[in-house]
């Protein structure tokens, strides 16, 4: 029988956690033949709720789930993990400046980076979801010297999925017919969903939709503000769709990408496409099932380059604020 993949999830008793754990334990992240062990990490006030969630996992009797660890101790939580899904973070409260938020979370992610560095399995890979996810990821990465930089990811897949559905609905085609939709930059309203390279049923999205003004002035902001639209409607932030995007991101990194497809993942930039080096920024990624790479040869229009540069400037500013606060 296969050795279980051990997965740590921080913020495991939160809303995304509640939608995510059951999908991992049921086999949707690593496949129907792969056992999994879950290391559920919460802060002390979340431990009681976490016990309830663990009881529900027990009550699902998932055949693939071999063990549940519940802890608020990072050294226990990250022990021998093959994947660390960093979902928990401190939300922005009223009156809190962006710099404060970056500082508070920066300190949390320093601790998590160190604990992952000291305890995780040799092959650990990390996906940061908790916002500001790009900068949180960068801070943790900088404090984990043993772990190769290419093992660190932050999540823009929810933005990609949102963008794909918007194009599909506009073009009246099934969403599976949309491909090559890369969201570039920061996971924030400044991100740029690159409709110029997107394909609808194999044809350029611009040709199929035939309305560049709609793409620039309606589609792009719609994707950027979708999170706020969901909060307004649901009274709570996206949780099931975020958890779904976590599953999609891990699947895309661990299985072979279709030949002409790519997906949005935030990785540590080494200057591809002229983006600044040393930020965790969203780029078009493909995988051979084990190794990933930034897809080469994507042609960017001047408008796209301008939008991407703005979003990456925001990441440079965030990095500066976060480092200053540490
Ligand atoms: P939530 O507030 O329901 O749950 C967060 C959980 O994390 C809570 O149970 C809390 O006790 C726990 N937590 C807080 N600090 C922690 C720490 N230092 N260590 C361990 N656990 C900790 O929030 P929700 O809805 O689950 O969202 C989680 C995060 O994901 C938020 O930062 C949110 O902004 C972000 N998010 C990111 C998305 C993306 O596309 N990258 C999409 C949607 C949400």
Image: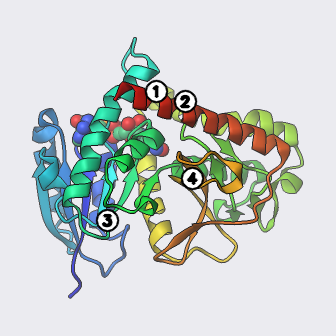
Q: Secondary structure at mark 4?
A: loop
Residue name at image x 47 percent, y 60 percent = 249
Disc 3 to disc 2, C-alpha distance: 29 Å
Instruction: Name the residue located 58 percent from the left edge and 48 percent from the top edge.
Output: 277
Q: Nearer the viewer, mark 3 or mark 4?
A: 4
Q: CA distance from mark 2 to mark 1?
A: 6 Å
**Earlier sequence position, callout 4 versus callout 1:** 4
| Residue 164: image location, x then y, percent | 65, 53
Mark with earlier residue (2, 4)? 4
Tag 2 residue: 317
> Tag 1: Cα neighbours inside 10 Å, few (<14), some, or many (≥20)?
some
- Residue 226 picture location, percent across and down: 57, 36
* Residue annotated with mark 1: 321
Give the residue at mark 4: 269
Residue 315's x, y, as percent? Answer: 55, 36
- The first of marks 3 and 4 along the sequence is 3
Toward which corner of the image does residue 316 lie, by quadrant? top right
In whole angstroms, how far apart are the C-alphas of marks 3 and 4? 19 Å
Label 1: which secondary element: helix
Note whether residue 125 is visible. Answer: yes
């Amino acid at each position: 029988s296969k050795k279980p993949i051990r997965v740590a999830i921080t913020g495991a008793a939160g809303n995304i956690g509640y939608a995510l754990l059951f999908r991992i334990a049921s086999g949707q992240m690593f496949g129907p033949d792969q056992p999994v062990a879950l290391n559920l990490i919460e802060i002390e006030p979340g431990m009681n709720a976490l016990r309830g969630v663990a009881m529900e996992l027990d009550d699902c009797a998932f055949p693939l789930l071999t063990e549940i660890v519940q802890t608020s101790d990072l050294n226990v939580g990250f022990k021998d993990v093959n994947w660390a899904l960093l979902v928990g973070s401190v939300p922005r409260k009223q009156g809190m400046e962006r710099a404060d938020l970056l500082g508070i979370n920066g300190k949390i992610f320093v601790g998590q980076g160190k604990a992952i560095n000291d305890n995780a399995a040799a092959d650990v890979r990390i996906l940061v979801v908790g916002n500001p996810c790009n900068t949180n990821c960068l801070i943790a990465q900088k404090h984990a010297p043993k772990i190769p930089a290419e093992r660190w990811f932050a999540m823009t897949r929810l933005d990609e999925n949102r963008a794909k559905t918007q194009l599909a609905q506009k073009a009246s085609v099934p969403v599976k017919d949309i491909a090559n939709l890369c969201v570039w930059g920061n996971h924030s309203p400044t991100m740029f969903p690159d409709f110029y390279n997107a394909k609808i049923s194999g044809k350029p999205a611009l040709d199929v939709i035939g309305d560049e003004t709609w793409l620039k002035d309606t589609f792009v902001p719609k994707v950027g503000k979708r999170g706020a639209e969901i909060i307004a409607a649901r009274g709570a932030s996206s949780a099931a769709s975020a958890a779904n995007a976590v599953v999609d991101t891990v699947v895309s990194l661990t299985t072979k990408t279709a030949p002409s497809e790519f997906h949005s993942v935030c990785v540590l930039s080494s200057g591809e496409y002229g983006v600044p080096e040393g930020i965790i920024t969203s780029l078009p990624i493909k995988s051979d099932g084990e190794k990933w790479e930034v897809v080469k040869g994507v042609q960017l229009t001047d408008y796209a380059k301008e939008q991407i540069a703005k979003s990456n400037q925001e990441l440079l500013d965030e990095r500066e604020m976060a480092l200053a606060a540490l």
